[in-house]
């Protein structure tokens, strides 16, 4: 529970910083600079990620209080090592299954170069779901 509380404090502090930054940017939005819109969108995306992480922490906390701690991997159903659960309280998978999932996600998210154009239009990579490590 201490790891969850510590992570929650870190995320709440970052959320407060981003929210304040976004508010300032909106107040100065009279700037016709198109990069300002991009910056706002990036901050809004980070805020959504943090909010999702906070919900995952709520779920992990509730599961621990109810004695339903996530001790087994949701994919292979093998025990999740205690060190991993302590380091990443929101984890639902063992390291091996999480690595496999991350590799599969990368294959779907990052397209290869287009053969006819020679250019590569890459989508941003998704950060791995290792206990909401932002």
Image: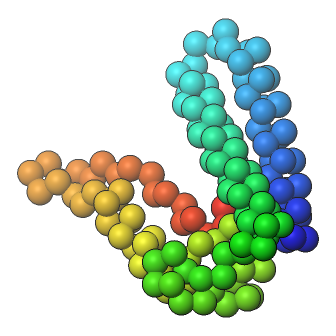
In the rendered image, residue 117, in percent from the top left (x then y), is placed at 14, 48
Which residue is found at the position 58% from the left and 13% from the top? 32
The quarter of the picture where the N terminus appears is bottom right
The quarter of the picture where the C terminus appears is bottom right
Which one is in front, 7 or 67? 67
Q: Quadrant of residue 80?
A: bottom right
Q: Quadrant of residue 85?
A: bottom right
Viewer can see residue 5: yes
Which residue is found at the position 23% from the left and 51% from the top? 119
User: In this picture, is 113 found above or below 81?
Assistant: above
How many numbered marks does the figure carry?
0
Scheme of colours in the image: rainbow
User: In this picture, is 132 found above or below 88?
Assistant: above
In the rendered image, residue 133, in percent from the top left (x then y), is placed at 68, 64
Which residue is found at the position 80% from the left and 52% from the top? 11
Which residue is found at the position 9% from the left and 51% from the top? 116
Which one is in front, 84 or 18? 84
- Left or right of residue 100, residue 91 in this image: right
Viewer can see residue 87: no
Task: Name, please, the residue furthest toward the top.
Answer: 30
In the rendered image, residue 112, in percent from the top left (x then y), is placed at 24, 60
Task: Name, please, the residue furthest toward the left.
Answer: 116
User: In this picture, is 22 found above or below 87?
Assistant: above
């Amino acid at each position: 529970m201490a790891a969850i509380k510590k992570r929650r404090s870190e995320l709440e502090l970052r959320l407060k910083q981003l929210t304040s930054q976004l508010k300032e940017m909106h107040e100065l939005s009279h700037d016709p600079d198109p990069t300002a819109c991009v910056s706002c969108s990036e901050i809004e995306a980070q805020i959504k990620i943090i909010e999702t992480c906070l919900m995952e922490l709520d779920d992990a906390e509730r599961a621990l209080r109810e004695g339903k701690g996530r001790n087994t991997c949701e994919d292979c159903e093998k025990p999740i090592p205690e060190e991993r659960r302590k380091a990443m309280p929101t984890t639902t998978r063992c390291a091996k299954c999480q690595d496999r999932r991350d590799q599969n996600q990368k294959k779907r998210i990052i397209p290869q170069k287009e053969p006819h154009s020679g250019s590569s239009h890459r989508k941003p990579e998704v950060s791995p779901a290792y206990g909401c490590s932002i």
